[in-house]
Image (cartoon, helix red, strand yellow):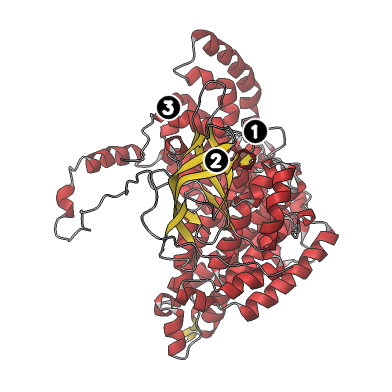
Amino acid sequence: MSSEKQVSEKEARQVAEAARQDTWDRPSFGKELFLGRLRLDLIDPWPRPDPAEDERAGEFLARLRAYVASEVDGAAIERDARIPDEVFQGLAGLGAFGMKIGREYGGLGLSNLHYCRALMLAGSVSPAIGALLSAHQSIGVPQPLKMFGTDEQRQRFLPRLAAGEVSAFLLTEPDVGSDPARLGTTAEPTPDGTGYRINGVKLWATNGTVATQLVVMARVPRTDGRRGGITAFVVDGDAEGITVERRNEFVGLRGLENSLTRFHDVFVPNENVIGGEGKGLRIALSTLTTGRLSLPAMCVGAGKWALHVAREWSAERVQWGRPVGEHEAVAQKLSFIAATTYGMETMLDLCCLLADDDRNDIRIEAALVKLYASEMAWRIADELVQIRGGRGYETADSLAARGERPAAVEQMLRDLRINRIFEGSTEIMHLLIAREAVDAHLSVAGDIIDPDAGLARKARAGARAGAFYARWLPTLAVGKGQQPTAFAEYGPLAAHLRHVERASRKLARSTFYAMSRWQGKMERKQAFLGRVVDIGAELFAMSAVCVRAHAERAERPENVELADLFCRQARVRIDALFTALWENTDSVDVVAAKRILAGRYSALEDGVIPPPADRPWVAPWTPGPSTVPTNARRHLPPPP
């Protein structure tokens, strides 16, 4: 019996749309940017953390630095593919499992800014530890309970998690990835009305082998008097009927405790439902808004680590009579690594500060920094391998065996690759951000292109659209960016902000033209939408670095140079993306892909031995008890 649930494209879109937060009750710099409005007042003056909290967090970060530097052997974790039990104990003793949990529940109550700095620090020693702490707190039980849980739920679970128990988030299934409409795991209400019985299989659950508390997404049947739908549950990881059937192994993050987990008639009481029936996907998406900030924290850490290695190596390694860093081919790479690391860090810090302020809607900004940092960190790692040459491809153990500094560059390349897939692949992030970026258009004109909308709805939408575009379109013609003296207060960075303002209006015009041209088919123009989002990410980054560098020009004058460098590089990328909006091979590629799928070019595959075809690409699963012993791994938090 296959678990696969077949749904139409329309049904899948409706499920995803219903999970969206469909209101904008707080300002959003990113939303305004995509509408052609550079609202620097939303990020300037540069936000500042609370000095008292800064000092308190600084004390914790100092303890964490001392611990991971002296007690955590990142090379051993990589070699053994396992985080030792004593590291779990040590991190728990520091309070690292409660960084995002409020002090009233025994946690540290760190801000998003300081939490991300802690992840960056820990991840620089072992990315597996960064992933452990991030998955536990950013998408595991603490965050959804903080946002949607009841007081009773928080009192019951959060103190245990702050003390060192580990949590995990279980959504993905063997045949369900980014399309939750096909979710196969079920939660059947019990006849006595006291709870639910969960049945299903969950794949790629980070922390799944070590977690004692799980957030599980399961489908409650819809019946008369019962809303049903995808629902979030807190589930005891040791409940009867749960089997960790295997620990998954990956090309990178070898210490990651990631599971394939089976649920067979697992009882969950009513009081463990988070937020109510049918709210699961909205909870997941809302949790990810701030949860996504943890992944770019690791990317920023990787950029800083890469810059250190690249700088020292390029200054010491001599070729053709000069340090390699002085040769233009390598100098370009060093410049890119430094500028991009500054850009990523600035985007992340700004998003964290805006999230801590809580007066801004950062759903677009958080998604942009996740997308941008994951892509750019991968490029940084690739460039670092090239700078290091053969030593970049050699393992740290092999380097050490030859008496050389064990810089684990090839490991960083492997570890970073997953970030373009984790918590929303690049392709899914493009679509998610694009949907939010065009929300203003769809809210006024969506019914015009909706085939299910009747004439009356279309007529009302036409009236709304006419009024909206009559006001909006004239604002895209001219703006502050065309004034030679605009943004003069930013000194040498003023020209870059003028470019951002002009490019923002150009991006809005391009989006409007595309919607007018393709209308309902716009959602299928995924390559076009991806470029629109990538331009927006660059503009957001440019805005952030200019504001930050200007704010810090007295204490960090070198940052003005970095901001200028970043903006110059970003402008080159933006120009190429604008050109590619209309000059591309998108339509030809789609036709070619259909021919490839139909096997027209299969002769091109001749001459090699392909992978064995004796197993399916996606393994089916059947309901029922597990037939293998559990691979769960448990450790006890230190005594209070």
Front disc: 3 or 2: 3
Residue 4: image location, x then y, percent: 36, 39
Q: Which mark is residue 433?
A: 2
Per the image, label 2 sits on a secondary structure element best described as: helix
The residue at the point 63 percent across, 40 percent down is 274
Three-letter code, disc 2:
Ile
Quadrant in the picture for the C terminus: bottom right
Three-letter code, disc 1:
Val
Quadrant in the picture for the N terminus: top left
Mark 1 or mark 3, earlier in chain? 3
Q: Are marks 1 and 3 in contact (CB under 8 Å)?
A: no
Per the image, label 1 sits on a secondary structure element best described as: loop
Front disc: 1 or 2: 2
So how many labels did they put on this image? 3
Question: What residue would you read off at disc 1?
Answer: 478
* Residue nearest the viewer, comparing 345 with 229: 229
Question: What residue would you read off at disc 3?
Answer: 10
Q: Residues within 10 Å of mark 1 (few under 14, many from 20)?
A: few
The residue at the point 36 percent across, 55 percent down is 627
The residue at the point 64 percent across, 81 percent down is 70
Residue 544: image location, x then y, percent: 67, 52
The answer for how far apart the CA atoms under marks 3 and 2 are is 20 Å
Residue 438 shown left or right of residue 355 in the figure: left
Quarter assignment of residue 457: top right
Q: Residues within 10 Å of mark 2 (few under 14, many from 20)?
A: many
Q: Are marks 1 and 2 in contact (CB under 8 Å)?
A: no
The answer for how far apart the CA atoms under marks 1 and 2 are is 26 Å
Residue 470: image location, x then y, percent: 63, 20
